[in-house]
Image: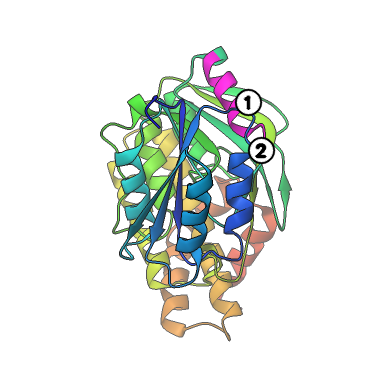
Amino acid sequence: MNAKPLVSIIVPVYNSEAFLEKCLHSICAQTLKDWECIAIDDGSTDTSGTILDTFAQHEPRMTVIHQKNSGVSASRNVGLQCARGDWIAFVDADDWIEPNMYETMYNRAIEQQCDAVVCAFFGQHFNRKIQNTHLFNSFQATQALFSIGGLGGFCWSKLIAKKRLEKLTFDTSIFYLEDMVFFYELFKICDRVYLEHEALYHYEIHESSVTQQRGLTVQAQTGLDALQTMLAKESNPSIQKAIRSFYLHFCISLYYGELKRDGGKTQAKDLLRKYIKKDFFFLLFFTHIPFKKKLFACAVRLGIV
């Protein structure tokens, strides 16, 4: 692998043996051939490392790095350090991608002269397809990052120009919404971001997924703290409003999660209720939070749930 690849695909891997082969096969099947895959085995205790090594023996475009367990953000940072491509992409080890994903996104990036391209995605429990294609400037992209049904605060649906990532890394102290924090900083320095309507990424939800840890866990608290930090440093009123709205939406989701965990911990519910009550009228009248969740917020405020 001497020639510089067009796209570097970074795959953090931790105990993903049940899904990993499907993920890797989908990468190898890309119609865009000029890529490298950097897979970081983050101290897996199952056969994930062996699966990666076996694939790498037969696929010269794949590089495998084995490291002590350090977390997904640290793994992605290692991938960024090693990436040689002009464009950077991320895939989660338990997901898979359409064969034309990176060819389509790369072509859009060149046609539209963009710093980043975002695609729609499929999910196990939902099928979200963005109907219209939009071109965003830096302000619009940052605002849409926090919008429900907007650009999405996750890295796996995006193709990013490496030149925009030279000074950016994932914060290893954040264990929830770390992608959103990363893209908040990135979109601030992007001139143009393109939203591709075609669904190209398959996001799978499993019981072991971090996003399925219900309620106000220690990890989720780091996400709330990160949102508060972004809100405090943001000077644009429209983006402040978007962050504030997302923060409340997240609090409602966490409160609902607490109820599903045997009624939830009283201390956690009290804290989330405090957050919701503090901004309750903003939540009701100045956000695009779904109506059912607003009703649920009313029940939370009144102490019914």
x, y percent for residue 162: 37, 28
Would residue 289 appear left or right of 240 to someone viewing this image?
Answer: right
What type is the residue that disc 1 sits on?
Thr
Vertically, is 71 above or below 264?
Answer: above
Q: Are marks 2 and 1 in contact (CB under 8 Å)?
A: yes
The residue that mark 2 highlights is 200
Secondary structure found at label 1: helix
Magenta range is 98-110
**Residue located 61% across and 23% down the image:** 134
Secondary structure found at label 2: strand
**Residue located 32% across and 47% down the image:** 77
x, y percent for residue 166: 28, 31
Specify whether residue 107 is painted magenta. yes
The residue that mark 1 highlights is 104
Distance of label 2 from label 1 (alpha carbons): 9 Å
Would residue 103 appear left or right of 138 to someone viewing this image?
Answer: right
Vertically, is 178 above or below 168?
Answer: below
Specify whether residue 162 is painted magenta. no
Vertically, is 16 above or below 33?
Answer: below
User: Between 108 and 226, which is closer to the camera in this rendering?
Assistant: 108
x, y percent for residue 51: 52, 59
